[in-house]
Image (tube, rainbow, N blue to C red):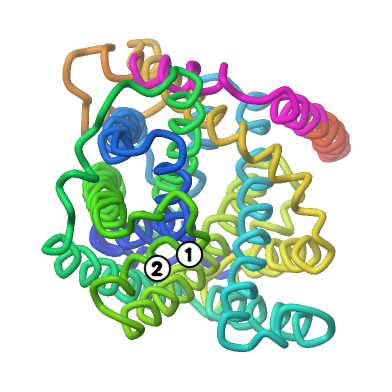
Amino acid sequence: TATTDRPALLRVMGRWDLTATGVNQVIGGAIFAVPAILAAAVGAWSPWLTIVVGFTSLLIAASIAEVASRFEGTGGPYLYTRAAFGRFAAFEVGWLSWVTRVASWASILQVFIATLGFYWPWATSGLPRAVLMIAVVGLITAINYRGIRQSSLAVNLFTVGKLTPLLIFIVVGVWFVDPVRVVPAGVPEFAALSSTALTLVFAFGGYENIPIPAGEARDPRRNMPFALILTLVIVTVVFALVQIVALGTLPTLAASSTPLADSAAVFLGAGGAALMTAAALISVAGNNLGGALAGSRILFALAEQGDVPALFSRIHPRFRTPGPAVLTTSAVTLTLGLTGTFAVLAQVSAISRLIVYVATCSATLRLRDPRFKTVVPAAAFVTPMGAVVPVAAMLCALAILAGATRLNLLAAGAGLAVGAVIYGVFAREAHLQVTLEQK
């Protein structure tokens, strides 16, 4: 509740703003590189596997949609886990989510600079690289700091900016597809299917960020399910059609380092290749902005619930944004981007996303228990078929988790251990503070 001393966040994001946020987060740099990886691994089966993973992701999104329809505050999966399983489990989910966001943003920042190198090779090393990184993070931080309206509008523009070239690629390219190249022949080995599915899961990742800024959304309990499900429908269709066009027009797709640009060059000429390169730049830039928004709101939610210092929950009286959380998230991301240390955290993020999925699907089931009727509101959206969808989603996430590498698992374990230590420190400080106040 807003007071003279504590202003509230502004609720300005509608269902289409939230959908744009989801599409912007899922369609990033991966779509411009993954088609070649898929073609090399499973060939003409790749479009079908894309649809299967898209459907699996839709199951997870539907589970998130149900639990999201019970809440109106900022935090997303962290908030749901806290209500269902308590403070410690929630802190681990929130901590890993924040680590994932800053590591992901740092990696996307690197990709953005590398993509700029296509036009200006001098920008990819030394002082120019550092200056560009600082400038990009500074601009994104300023947009995020000055208001959710500006951030939401910018995300909407970037989403349109990245979808338009992809739609041109699909609509024009489909007429040049050689049907022979997209007809599957033989069944790939299970190992190839498993590793490709894991690649696609992370390519589809990002929709779990949609409910994080719920505290700045209008009617979030109804609009979150709409945005989550529509996002998965849109990105599954786009991913599958892009894969079909690339596979059907570029014979050397599996060996290409710039698959969409090379494919577009076949049927649109040099202008098509340039269009796809520009689209990649726009797409990665939009991902940077979305990462800043989600990361800062996770830190804000942790502070709002008392799990990290209250400083990070402070809201700017004029801009109505969580200023300290925005500045801290940006500063950590810039440090990781400049030093390259995000590569270590990337191993953590590879597993943490699946941990978040499992925790959220579990929360969906647990909060259906009648004992929670007095704890959280009734769901405004309920997945069909009872427990089938959440359980199937959880099993899919666990199956993919089982295929993770030993390094991924060790890194995630280390991340959880660090989170436990941080939780212990803050929990002790909070206890001491309460004791002092009681005295």
The part of the chain drawn in magenta is 392-417
170 versus 192 height, above or below: below
The residue closer to the viewer here, 177 or 428, is 177
Residue to which mark 2 is pinned: 262
Residue to which mark 1 is pinned: 258
Left or right of 381 in this view: 398 = right
Disc 1 marks a residue whose amino acid type is: Thr
Q: Secondary structure at mark 1?
A: loop
Q: Quadrant of residue 305?
A: top right
Residue at point 33% right, 65% down? 263
Report if the CB atoms under discs 1 and 2 are less than 8 Å apart. yes
What type of secondary structure mainly makes up the magenta span?
helix
6 versus 356 height, above or below: below
Quadrant location, the C terminus: top right
Left or right of 242 in this view: 81 = right
Q: Residues within 10 Å of mark 1 (few under 14, many from 20)?
A: some
The percent coordinates of residue 220 (x first, y second) are 31, 49
The residue closer to the viewer here, 48 or 220, is 48
Viewer can see residue 318: yes
Residue at point 24% right, 45% down? 181
